Amino acid sequence: MSRIVACLWVLGAFLLTSPAAGQDTEAPLPVETEDPNTRRLSLAEVIKMAREQSPSYQQALTQLENRTWQYQNYKSNYLPQLTLNATLPDYTKSINPVVQNTGSIEFRKQHISTSYAELALSQNIGLTGGVISINTNLKRIDDFLQPDTMVGHSYASTPAVITLSQPLFRHNGLKWDRKTEPLRFEEAKRNFWEEMERIAIRASDLYFSQLHSQISYDIAQKNVANNDTLFKIAQTRFYNAKISVNELLQLELSLLNSRQSLEQAKLDIETSTIRLKSYLGITDDSPIRLTTPDAIPQFDVDETAALKYAHDNRSRMIGIKREEIEAERGLDWAEKDTGLNANLFLQYGLVQQSTAFSETYRDPSEQQRVSIGLSVPIMDWGRTKSRVGTARAHLKYVKGNLEQQRASFDQDVYLQVKRFKMLREQMKIAQQANGLAERRYLGAKDRYLTGKISLLELNQAATERDSARRSYVSSLRNFWDAYYNLRLQTLYDFETNQPLILPMPF
């Protein structure tokens, strides 16, 4: 008797919610209309925006611009420098020590004004590390303590003087700069274009995070609509005693779970949209709708060719060469700047002095100077030997380390090509599986409505359909990640058969 009462109670509860009971059923879910301001973006458009307006692009551009100015500064070291130096005037009124004719020093009152102007043209000699310069200058001294009957001013001029300052046996930094600075600048340019590919990889990752959230939201909406329809049909079938109470409760539970999943999907898509907009530098509140990048580029990638492109284009290969030269430079410095050092100074010019400006440049006298300075270490307690030994050991270590880096570099390129090919095949399989799962679910839904399969089989088909869809998007994500990583590893576009090294962006 108690079982009969319980069944009647459950039946009455469902009759109250069934259409046959004459009560209002649950209203169907409202169909969400798309915001007219919605941005529709493809993967290519997102990457293009990231490469043109994202903060990461601006940062990369600033770094390249900074390195460009540094390179211009390096080149200026090998160009003539014209300088004007002047003191107009240097006024003094004081008591100062003055050297007398006898060689003694006495304190005397001084009230003078000194003026000086010099024009100097200098040029570094990159081959030898010396400096050659041509100077001309004029000096004037005004002595205010001279009697009014005497001339209180005088001039001294150097119409022209040529000076050569040449270090001997020393480390020539200018010569080594010629080897390293062009490599450093070329490395910076390659780094910029590599950064463009890294931006594409990051934008692609955020794109697929958004796309995954978008598809999960679409699936959740579809599941809510399907479960709502199935539950309403089940209510009618339960009223007609065609299904059990347990099956009806399962459908109602599925509807509640799908609604809960929809709420979570709304939060996930909002979060991923904010992250994508922040990276792209988008500040408006318009929603974003992404398209699935189903079109897969078809091209052949040969491992040998990819390795050649990587060696020709990547900044790391230039960096390896630069680091080896810098280690050799360190050894050269240790050997030359810790041993015998000498400096040669040569100067030849013309000089004249007079109390009248018009006579200052008339019949100038010759000025000559020759100087050789030496520095010879006699006892340094092994300092020179230790510095040279340290530099040689460092060079040996750098060469060994760089050789290992070359091998690792080649291995990374080879494995990236293999990964790209594998993921492209996996993506094709996932695309087929996605289509099969969708068709299987639609068939299972029709068979369930006709009573040919159970609810368990329908739920399994729905689960497999959602899983196949998500798996397909994950395969797309992995493929495009491998695609842009292949471009990064080689700085080469295999789709158009062109290198990715372009002219300077400014």
Image (cartoon, grey):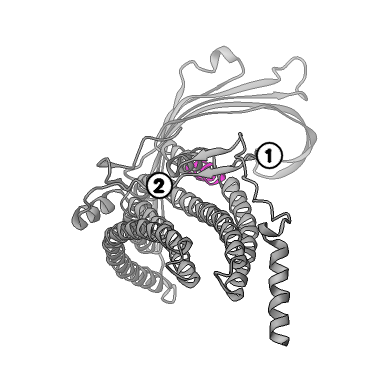
Residue 168 can be seen in this image: no
Query: Where residue 248 sits: x, y (%)?
Result: 60, 70
Q: Nearer the viewer, residue 397 or 90?
A: 397
Check disc 2 and give the amino acid type.
Answer: Pro
**Overall secondary structure of the magenta stretch?**
helix
Residue 39, by quadrant, is top right
Q: Nearer the viewer, residue 1 or 62?
A: 1
Q: Position of residue 354 (x, y in %)?
A: 58, 20
Q: How many marks?
A: 2
Sort mark 1 into few (<14), some (14-19) or many (20+) by Cα contacts within 10 Å: few
In terms of secondary structure, where does tag 1 sit? loop
Quadrant the N terminus occupies: bottom right
Dot 1 amino acid type:
Gln
- In front of the other: label 1 or label 2? 2
| Horizontal and vertical percent position of residue 257 | 62, 66
Quick one: 204 or 472, which is closer to the camera?
472
Which of 14/199 is in front? 14
Q: Which residue is mark 1?
A: 100
Is label 2 in a helix, a strand or a loop?
loop
Relative placement, left or right, of 273 versus 398 is right
Above or below 235: residue 350 = above
In magenta stretch: residue 428: no
Q: Which residues are magenta?
A: 55-64
Return the x and y of residue 109 as percentages of the image width and height: 79, 34
**Residue in the picture at 45% in, 37% down:** 72
Residue holding disc 2:
293
Determine if residue 135 is in view: yes
Q: Is residue 233 left or right of residue 470?
A: right
What is the crowding at mark 2: few (fewer than 14 residues within 10 Å), some, or many (at least 20)? some
N-terminal label among 1 and 2: 1
